[in-house]
Image (cartoon, grey):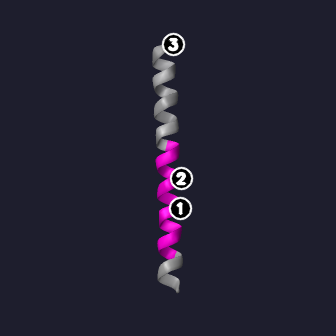
Amino acid sequence: MWFFFFFFLILLGLEFLITMFFFFCCFDYEVCYL
């Protein structure tokens, strides 16, 4: 039970980090283009 909860938490964290990473990359690229 704990293992699945921990695994779900890690997946959620990774998804959040990847989303934020891509968001900041897009933001940087837009700033560079400007």
Give the residue drawn at x 48%, y 27%: 28
Q: Amino acid at mark 2?
A: Phe
Q: Of helix, strand and loop, which one carries label 1?
A: helix
Nearest the viewer among 28 and 5 is 5
Q: Which mark is residue 12?
A: 1
- C-alpha separation, residue under disc 3 versus residue under disc 2: 27 Å
Sequence order check: which comes first, mark 3 or mark 2? 2
Question: Which residue does the numbered mark 2 point to in the structure image?
Answer: 16
Give the residue drawn at x 52%, y 84%: 2
Give the residue drawn at x 54%, y 77%: 5
Q: With respect to residue 4, does 16 lie above or below?
A: above
Question: Which residue does the numbered mark 3 point to in the structure image?
Answer: 34
Q: Which mark is residue 4?
A: none
Answer yes or no: do the residues labelled 1 and 3 have beta carbons within 8 Å?
no
User: Horizontal and vertical percent for residue 11?
Assistant: 48, 63
Is-magenta flag for residue 19?
yes
Q: Amino acid at mark 3?
A: Leu
Q: Of helix, strand and loop, which one carries label 3?
A: loop
**Badge 3 local density, few (<14 within 10 Å), some, or many (20+)?**
few
Q: Amino acid at mark 1?
A: Leu
Residue furthest to the bottom: 1
**Badge 2 local density, few (<14 within 10 Å), some, or many (20+)?**
few
Answer yes or no: do the residues labelled 2 and 1 have beta carbons within 8 Å?
yes
Give the residue drawn at x 50%, y 21%: 30
Q: With respect to residue 4, does 29 lie above or below?
A: above
Which region of the structure is painted magenta? 6-20
**Badge 1 local density, few (<14 within 10 Å), some, or many (20+)?**
few
Q: Of helix, strand and loop, which one carries label 2?
A: helix
Image label count: 3
Classified by dominant secondary structure, the portion drawn in magenta counts as helix
Q: With respect to residue 1, does 9 lie above or below?
A: above
